[in-house]
C-alpha cells in the first residue's frame, strides 16, 4: 500500500507512520508528503526518510480548489493508494475527494462526533468531560463528519493538565493510526452501503 501524507506542522503522526513501516508493523510505503506550510518540521522528517515532498504556502491556498487540484495531481503522479491526513489543518475539497473517493483518512483528537474542529483537545478539557479520545475516520466534504473507522478512549484524570492530556492523546494517535492503516493494507476495512465502517 502506497500512502500520500498531508501535514501542517511538526509531523509526529508522520513519524509514527515512518517508524511503523521501518519496524514492519505497517505494510506500506510513503510516496509523497504534502505540507500546507513551507516551514513545517514534518518536512524535515520526510527528507530524513528520503520521501519526496510538496510544500505549499498560505498564498498557494488563495483559491482552495486550485490548491487541492494541484495536490491531487501530485498525489496521482506519486501513485498513492490512500491519502492520510496527519494533522493537516485544512479541509480537503472536491478535487482531492473526487481523485481519491473513500480513500482519504483523517485522525481527530477527540471522540467524534463530539468536539469537532481544530481545538478538540482544549475544548474537551475545558468542558470537563472525563473521557475523550482519538478517532480515525474517512474524510468527506463535511469537516470531521466522515464515516468512523476506529476510536480509542482516553481518560481525563483530576490531576491532568491540558499539556498532560495532549501528551496522552498524542501517544494514542501514534499507536492507533498505524494500526488502522495496517487494517487498510490488509483489506480489512469495508465501507458499507449505509456509509458505516465494518472491520473484517
Image (cartoon, grey):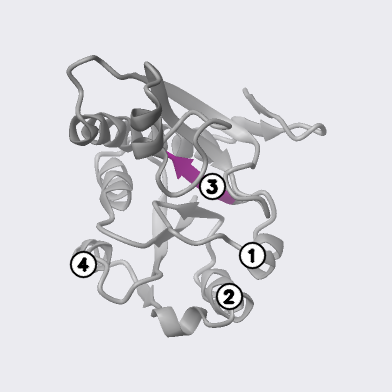
Task: First in sequence, mark 4 or 3: give its number.
Answer: 4
Residue 158 horizontal/vertical position (percent) = 23, 14
Asked whether residue 200 is drawn in magenta, I would say no
Task: First in sequence, mark 4 or 1: give its number.
Answer: 4
| 38 to 92, vertically: above or below | below
Q: What kind of element bears circle 1?
A: loop
Q: Residue at x 31, y 32 (%)?
A: 169
The label shown at residue 44 is 4
Q: Distance from label 2 to label 3 (Cα)?
A: 19 Å
Q: Distance from label 2 to label 1 (Cα)?
A: 8 Å
* Residue named by callout 3: 105
Residue 149 horizontal/vertical position (percent) = 57, 32
10 Å crowding of disc 2: few (<14), some (14-19), many (20+): some
Of circles 4 and 1, the one toward us is 1
Asked whether residue 107 is drawn in magenta, I would say yes
Q: Mark 2 and mark 1 in contact? Answer it, CB < 8 Å.
A: yes
| 78 to 147, vertically: above or below | below
Q: Which segment did they paint magenta?
A: 104-108
Of circles 2 and 3, the one toward us is 2
* Residue named by callout 1: 93
Task: First in sequence, mark 2 or 3: give its number.
Answer: 2
Q: Mark 4 and mark 3 in contact? Answer it, CB < 8 Å.
A: no
Q: Can you tell which quarter of the image residue 182 is in?
A: top left
Q: Residue at x 47, y 83 (%)?
A: 60
Q: Distance from label 4 to label 3 (Cα)?
A: 22 Å
Q: Can you tell which quarter of the image residue 113 is in?
A: top right
Task: Report whether 153 appears left or right of 105.
Answer: left
Task: First in sequence, mark 3 or 1: give its number.
Answer: 1
Q: Nearer the viewer, residue 22 or 142?
A: 142
Q: Mark 2 and mark 3 in contact? Answer it, CB < 8 Å.
A: no
Task: Report whether 97 appears left or right of 144.
Answer: right
Amino acid at each position: 500500500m502506497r500512502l500520500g501524507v498531508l501535514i501542517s506542522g511538526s509531523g509526529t503522526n508522520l513519524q509514527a507512520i515512518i517508524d511503523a513501516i521501518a519496524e514492519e508493523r505497517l505494510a506500506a510505503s510513503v510516496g509523497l508528503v504534502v505540507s500546507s506550510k513551507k516551514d513545517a518540521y514534518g518536512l524535515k522528517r520526510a527528507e530524513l526518510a528520503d520521501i519526496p515532498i510538496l510544500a505549499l504556502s498560505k498564498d498557494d491556498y488563495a483559491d482552495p480548489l486550485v490548491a487541492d487540484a494541484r495536490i491531487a495531481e501530485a498525489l496521482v503522479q506519486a501513485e498513492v493508494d490512500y491519502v492520510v491526513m496527519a494533522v493537516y489543518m485544512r479541509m480537503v475539497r472536491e478535487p482531492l475527494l473526487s481523485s481519491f473517493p473513500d480513500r482519504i483518512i483523517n485522525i481527530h483528537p477527540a471522540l467524534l462526533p463530539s468536539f469537532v474542529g481544530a481545538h478538540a483537545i482544549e475544548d474537551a478539557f475545558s468542558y470537563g468531560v472525563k473521557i475523550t479520545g482519538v478517532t480515525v475516520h474517512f474524510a468527506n466534504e463535511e469537516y470531521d463528519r466522515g464515516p468512523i473507522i476506529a476510536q480509542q478512549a482516553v481518560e481525563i484524570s483530576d490531576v491532568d493538565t491540558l499539556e498532560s492530556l495532549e501528551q496522552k492523546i498524542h501517544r494514542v494517535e501514534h499507536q492507533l493510526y498505524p494500526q488502522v492503516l495496517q487494517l487498510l493494507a490488509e483489506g480489512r476495512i469495508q465501507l458499507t452501503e449505509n456509509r458505516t465502517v465494518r472491520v473484517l
